[in-house]
Image (cartoon, coloured by chain):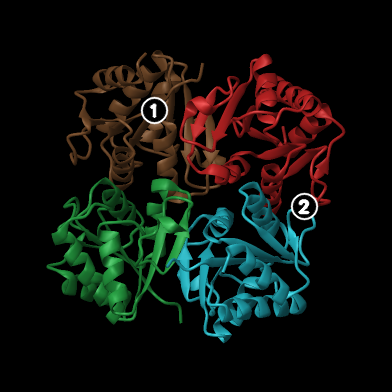
Chain colours: A brown, B green, C cyan, D red
Amino acid sequence: MVKTLIGVVGSGLEDPELDAIAFEVGALIAREGKVLVNGGLGGVMKASARGCKDKGGTTIGILPGLDPEEANPYIDIPIATGLGEMRNLIIVRAASVLIAIGGSYGTLSEIALALKTSKPVIGINTWDISPQIIKAAGPADAVKTALGIIGT
Amino acid sequence: MVKTLIGVVGSGLEDPELDAIAFEVGALIAREGKVLVNGGLGGVMKASARGCKDKGGTTIGILPGLDPEEANPYIDIPIATGLGEMRNLIIVRAASVLIAIGGSYGTLSEIALALKTSKPVIGINTWDISPQIIKAAGPADAVKTALGIIGT
Amino acid sequence: MVKTLIGVVGSGLEDPELDAIAFEVGALIAREGKVLVNGGLGGVMKASARGCKDKGGTTIGILPGLDPEEANPYIDIPIATGLGEMRNLIIVRAASVLIAIGGSYGTLSEIALALKTSKPVIGINTWDISPQIIKAAGPADAVKTALGIIGT
Amino acid sequence: MVKTLIGVVGSGLEDPELDAIAFEVGALIAREGKVLVNGGLGGVMKASARGCKDKGGTTIGILPGLDPEEANPYIDIPIATGLGEMRNLIIVRAASVLIAIGGSYGTLSEIALALKTSKPVIGINTWDISPQIIKAAGPADAVKTALGIIGT
């Protein structure tokens, strides 16, 4: 059976509050036996991967550059794409559902591309640009909603 | 001397008001001797290309699919990419400056990717998601601002 | 009516003999009213664009980097993709037919991707790796064959 | 420590002899604790993934389409790219070294893109188009050579 990938997108900058949320989201994804895919760098990407590894989960980092060492230390599988910001759409396409946590323009591009291509987006403290973004109260609510969408 | 490309992004759906604006923007780009690049399909893409051709300009359509015939009839040069929505970032990268007119999630992805990669964005009745989007009062203002940015 | 693009692929290194062939191919494409698309850099790309401009034709350069100034001076329309060597497949997809002149591994990747996706390839002194490559005796033969394939 | 990905490329068509080689290559990659990345579909891609899973390894499939279910049943992590044949270069970029087994034009494009971007290629019964392809006598020789290149 194909493993379902849950995408976690958010800012690459450190932010204690958002990183704590991302850590918990990653941990819950691992506990549910799902695979985490993100952009493989810092901030929300690093914190969510750390949370996922903390519970023994699997983490995939879709990197903008060509060097797998660019991945944060909590990424199991670095996918070096060399696509720059275009790798954002690979994350959107690879994930069955996206959880957006905070974030700036890169995250906004991921949300927009997801909505454009009818990929479900769950948001925690993120861009409030569409009623199609399913607002979650916190990590547990977000992951529960994601599982409901995936149908498992 | 390399020709400067001005990108025009916006909804693919017909909208008389926005299409009239897009037509005028295209016409002004042609009058200034610049090349228009857009997504090659309908709505703002079609209207801006029609305006540009009306004044003898050159139009480039970066298409999501593999068939050049998919381009609207006002596209001189169809670039069939087969990238789907990922072609949005090719438009952003190819253009020296973007003019966004109205638009939905596809346009929002283009604006976000432009802001993320420090490409200037001029907006007419479009997503109001950042002070970095330079608001234009209308077609003349938008094209004048674009020329100012390009430095010609 | 959508303009048909003819792709010209070959080495980026200067080579007097191949460059003379590429110049003539570009000139003939212009004389037939077709648009030339290539990778926008040196060697065969530069020589074919120079030949095309010499006869008043239109040239499109699909660039690997992000800087349109990277294009050789005979490119009318630079499309900066930031895709690196992945831009090779954009050339293959955008062209209705490919003419391969000499070339090294980059050219080989273009030939292989063309054959894989059933895009016709005409070869002059190029990789002899498939009977599906239509061998041309020289520029006139190559462009004539290309026009026959396009059906005009 | 970042896991090293070994790419296995080859024909998507079933071929008992090549599939047996691919199975063994996949098994040896797993035994060495490396991760296998390939195109996720049939033939050599399926056989190598099956061999890798047989020894408890991890398999990544970089898919051309948008549907993760398109992956063969031995792929742990499907990465749906929607890039078509352009996904071949993602495989080349993600892998630290490529092992090519037989193969047709798709494989040839991967070999060419690897050589163009200085990614080492080890070949078993594959395209004989360059002395830069390191010929391997069989699966054990190929994986041993790959490990030597990776430096572990």
Q: Is residue A6 left or right of residue D92?
A: left
In the picture, residue A43 is in which quadrant?
top left
In this rendering, position of residue B82 left or right of residue D51: left
Percent x, y for residue C128?
80, 57
Residue drawn at point x = 25 percent, y = 64 percent: B47
Q: Is residue B94 visible?
A: yes
The chain that hosts pointer 2 is: C
Q: Quadrant of residue C32?
A: bottom right
D135 or B20: nearer the eye? B20
Q: Residues within 10 Å of mark 1 (few under 14, many from 20)?
A: many
> Which percent across, then down, holds residue A45?
39, 34
The chain identifier of the residue carrying mark 1 reads A
Residue found at x 28% / y 81%: B31
Mark drawn on residue D15? none
Specify the amino acid type for callout 1.
Ser
Q: Do the residues under discs 1 and 2 have CB atoms within 8 angstroms?
A: no
What residue is shown with label 2? C130
Residue A72 screen position, x and y as percent: 47, 35
Q: Residue at x 19, y 52 (%)?
A: B127
Labels 1 and 2 share a subunit: no
- Vertical arrangement, residue B100 with respect to residue D68, above or below: below
Can you give x and y, in whole percent of width and height, for residue A136 in the image?
21, 25
Quadrant housing the C terminus of chain B: bottom left
| Residue B99 horizontal side relative to residue B79, left or right | left
B71 and B119: which is toward the camera: B71
Q: Residues within 10 Å of mark 2 (few under 14, many from 20)?
A: few
Q: Which residue is mark 1?
A: A96
Q: Amino acid at mark 2?
A: Ser
Q: Secondary structure at mark 1?
A: loop
In the current view of this chain or complex, which residue is farthest to the right? Answer: D137
